[in-house]
């Protein structure tokens, strides 16, 4: 049985792309991996980097910078692959860094501002203010919509 405090907050993984912080629910994250060899798959969108074999599971890898039409970046030591579970499928997202795990008060989540004006706005479910930080909450199903068609 859930307590009131569990319903009022959500645990999220915070990751970075360029100078923005994004968040996805911990419940969707299967793991965070260092960048590894990715096998390219022909005839896939540019943002689909290919697949990896992760503990016997072939997992598609998406570069979120390319998915959001952000400038490409050289991979750094901090670059990570966040493995998420979406509709019984595991998918890896390449991100600049995975920063931390935080609790977000559900009351601090606001709808996406209409003035965001960024290419990735269709992928955003809301924003959360946490002290001096602004976390952009991703709508994972929208990020993957073209993969599942």
Image (spheres, rainbow, N blue to C red):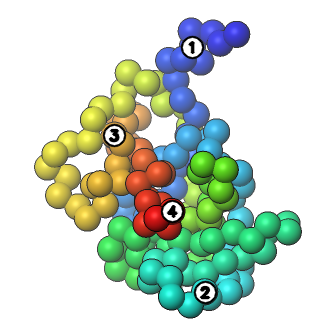
Q: Nearer the viewer, residue 19 or 1?
A: 1
Residues at marks 2 and 3, CA–CA distance in whole angstroms: 32 Å
Query: Crowding at label 3, few (<14), some or many (≥20) Cα neighbours within 10 Å?
Result: some
Q: Which residue is labeled 3 in the image?
A: 126
SS at mark 1? helix
Q: Residue furthest right?
A: 56
Which residue shows up at 72% across the image and 55% down it?
31
> Looking at the image, is mark 4 or mark 3 earlier in the sequence?
3
Q: Quadrant of residue 17?
A: bottom left
Residue under pointer 1? 5
Task: Give the number of the mark in front: 4 or 3.
Answer: 4
- The residue identified by callout 2 is 41
Q: Secondary structure at mark 2?
A: loop
Name the N-terminal-most of marks 1 and 4: 1
Residue at the spot 34% in from the left edge and 74% down from the top edge: 70
Among the two numbered marks 2 and 1 on one chain, the one whose residue lies closer to the N terminus = 1
| Lower position in the chain sequence, tag 2 or tag 3 | 2
């Amino acid at each position: 049985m859930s307590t009131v405090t569990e319903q009022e907050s959500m645990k999220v993984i915070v990751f970075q792309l360029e100078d923005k912080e994004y968040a996805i629910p911990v419940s969707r994250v299967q793991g965070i991996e260092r960048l590894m060899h990715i096998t390219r798959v022909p005839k896939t969108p540019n943002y689909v980097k290919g697949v990896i074999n992760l503990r016997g599971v072939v997992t598609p890898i998406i570069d979120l910078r390319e998915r959001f039409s952000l400038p490409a970046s050289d991979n750094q030591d901090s670059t990570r692959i966040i493995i998420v579970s979406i509709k019984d499928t595991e998918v890896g997202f390449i991100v600049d860094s995975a920063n931390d795990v935080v609790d977000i008060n559900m009351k601090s989540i606001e709808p996406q501002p209409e003035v965001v004006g960024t290419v990735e706005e269709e992928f955003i479910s809301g924003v959360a203010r946490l002290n001096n930080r602004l976390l952009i909450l991703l709508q994972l199903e929208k990020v993957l919509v073209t993969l599942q068609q």
